[in-house]
Structures are given as C-alpha cells and as structure tokens.
Image (cartoon, rainbow, N blue to C red):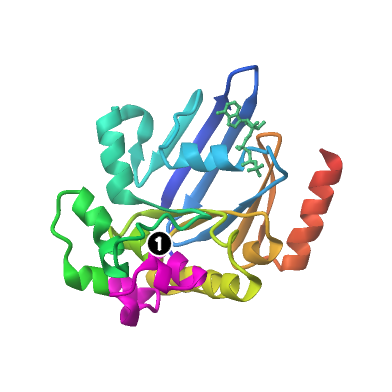
Amino acid sequence: MNNTQAVDLIGVTKHYAHGVTALDDVTIGFGAGTFTAVMGPSGSGKSTLLQCAAGLDRPSTGRVVVDGRDLAALADRKLTLLRRDRIGFVFQSFNLLPSLTAEQNVGLPLRLAGRRPDRELVRQSLGAVGLAERAGHRPAEMSGGEQQRVAIARALVTRPAVLFADEPTGALDANTSRDVLRLLRTLVDRQAQTIVMVTHDPVAASYAGRVVFLADGRVFGELHEPTAELVATRMLQLEASC
Ligand SMILES: Nc1ncnc2c1ncn2[C@@H]1O[C@H](COP(=O)(O)OP(=O)(O)OP(=O)(O)O)[C@@H](O)[C@H]1O
C-alpha cells in the first residue's frame, strides 16, 4: 500500500430533478491499494457516489480526480477512454455475454479498445481469479460465483487504477459470496488493487479495510478494519437517526 490516492472526490454535490440532492458536499479519498466499502440506508447516495467517482455521471459541483486526472477537464470522448482503460466495474448481475467463453468475455475490453486480446494477459487475469481451467466454458456452464469471478477478471484485464463494485455479491448465496469477497481481498493484498465496493451486507463490508457510511448524501463517519457486528451496529444507529 502507498500513500497516493487512486480516487479523490472534493466537495462533490449532485442534484437531480425535483429538488433531490443525492450527494451533498462530499469530500473523500480512496488510497491506491486500499479496499473500501460504502454503506448507508437506501437512498443515501451510494450509487450516485459510485457513478460520479467512476465518471459515469458528472457532479453538479465539486471535483473528481481518478488516477491523477481531473474528470471535469475531460471531454466526453476522453472520459470514455479513461473509463475504459483505467476504471473497472463489477455489478450485481454479472453481465457476461452468454455466447462467449470465459476467455472471450475477459478479452472483450481489449477488443473494444481495438487491441488484439493478448492471450497471456487474458489467461493471467483468469488465473488471478482461480479460473485458469475454465477458459473455454460459457457462462451457462459455470456457477454464479464463477461467473462473477469471470466478470472480475474482465474488469481487471486492463489493469485499472480502481475497481468499482456495486453489490458484487448481491446475487450470490453466503458461501459463494465469501469466496468472491476473499478473492477481492486477495487482489488488494497481493496485487495492491484499489477497490471501492457498495454493499448492504455488513459481512461483505467486513472484508474491506475501511467502511465509509453515507446518510442523506453526506459522509457520516467511517470504520477501519471493522467486524461485521460493528458495521451492523453502526448501520442500525444510522437508520434509526434518519
Ligand atoms: N436519475 C435520478 N433522478 C432523480 N433522482 C435520483 C436519480 N437517481 C437517484 N436519485 C435519488 O437520489 C437519491 C440517492 O440515490 P442513490 O441511488 O444514489 O442511493 P443509494 O444509497 O444507492 O440507494 P439504494 O441503496 O436504494 O440503491 C435518492 O433519493 C434517489 O431517489
């Protein structure tokens, strides 16, 4: 782990129509090589924070800096390129293409970038998620957990500065979730991958080194190296005070 920030949000506010303020002057950094969980009651702004941090949406005011680049200074095309090359995404639904093998799915971001998928790179990515033996399998031939691991390999194949995960275990049972969370933790510990994960699950959050709590679009404290029990207690307090 080093001290550089992979992502910085500085005074970020996001207004939507009908007078909704989804983020209210949020300043927060995500250090390179760290694993952060973002938690908060429904509607507290978690997805909006992820969308703004990932350059999928632009803040109303404030700045977002990813991998040293100020997103506000980038025109749409350059922002798309930065997202493609430096930012990885994993969602609750695995979003794999059913007709493609694991290997082809993982190589997709390279193809979209106009690069010939480097077989070695793709194999390394699949190896890093423990699926080197499944390269030729299609999604329907794999379990939910294996499909999510393919999605993680695909998100990491471009070696992004940050991996954003939105409820990555939301569609998985407890045992499979644990495997995926252990994998995320290993990617942070062994490869210094930066991960920012939105979750509703205190057990999932306990795999992160830091949990940031949101309520009403604002940061309401954080915990470091938390247990699931501590996270659950903090969430109950937060929900009671909303
Ligand atoms: N496109 C939009 N237009 C208008 N309001 C929106 C839009 N997207 C989100 N909101 C509102 O912004 C607030 C924050 O929403 P957001 O989805 O970021 O919360 P969340 O914490 O991710 O919620 P959940 O846990 O339910 O997914 C909510 O009040 C929501 O209704």
Q: Tell me residue 51's x, y (percent).
A: 48, 39
Could you tell me which residue is drawn at 33 percent across and 55 percent down? 160
Q: What count of labels does the image hold?
A: 1
Q: Quadrant of ligand 1?
A: top right
Would residue 225 be visible to someone looking at this image? no
Mark 1 Cα shell of 10 Å, populated few (<14), some (14-19), many (≥20):
many
Which residue bears the numbered disc 1?
151
Which residue is the extreme one toward the bottom?
133
Residue 210, image quadrant: bottom right
Please name whichever residue, 172 or 193, is drawn nearer the observer in this view of the structure: 172
Q: Quadrant of the N terminus?
A: bottom left
Q: Tell me residue 154's x, y (percent).
A: 34, 61
Q: Quadrant of the C terminus?
A: top right
Q: Tell me residue 77's x, y (percent).
A: 25, 32
**Residue 7 included in the magenta stretch of the image:** no
Range shown magenta? 124-152
Residue 120, image quadrant: bottom left
Could you tell me which residue is drawn at 44 percent across and 62 percent down? 33
Compared to residue 79, the image places residue 105 above or below, namely below
Q: Amino acid at mark 1?
A: Ala
Q: Tell me residue 167's x, y (percent).
A: 57, 55
